[in-house]
Amino acid sequence: MEKVKVRDVKKALRLCNWVLVFVDGDRYRYRHPAVLDSITIIGRDNDYVSRANLEFMERQLGLSLRPVLA
């Protein structure tokens, strides 16, 4: 898997109907109406998300962002 930028992950979440509910500096918290948990993305738009963090988010969300990011 190639490197993924924070802006691409945020875009993928928006396309999957996640809503931005909180911003604190470089921390962006998203929530989905059908999911109890929220997800936090840390970093500036040009930063890369590590593979481990992306896999953790996918496990936490229960879905794969890879088709949306492609």
Image (cartoon, rainbow, N blue to C red):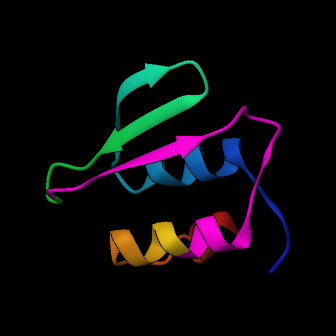
Identify the magenta region: 36-55
Task: Tell whether 5 sits left or right of 54.
Answer: right
Q: Quadrant of residue 10?
A: top right
Residue at position x 47%, y 52% from top?
13
Report x, y in % for residue 3: 84, 65
**Residue 67 versus residue 27: which sits nearer the camera?**
27
Residue 34 against residue 32 in the figure, above or below: below
Membership of 38 in magenta stretch: yes
Question: In which quadrant is the C terminus drawn?
Answer: bottom right
Does residue 28 sit above or below 35 in this rendering? above
Q: Is residue 52 left or right of residue 62?
A: right
Q: Residue at x 40, y 37 (%)?
A: 29
Q: Based on the displayed image, in which of its 4 quarters is residue 66 positioned?
A: bottom right
Q: Is residue 68 magenta?
A: no
Residue at image point 85% right, 73% down:
2
**Residue sitting at 15 percent across and 49 percent down?**
33
Horizontal and vertical percent position of residue 23: 45, 22
Where, quadrant-wise, is the N terminus in this rendering? bottom right
In the figure, 65 relative to 14: above or below?
Answer: below
Find residue 11 and report its horizontal and vertical position in percent: 58, 45
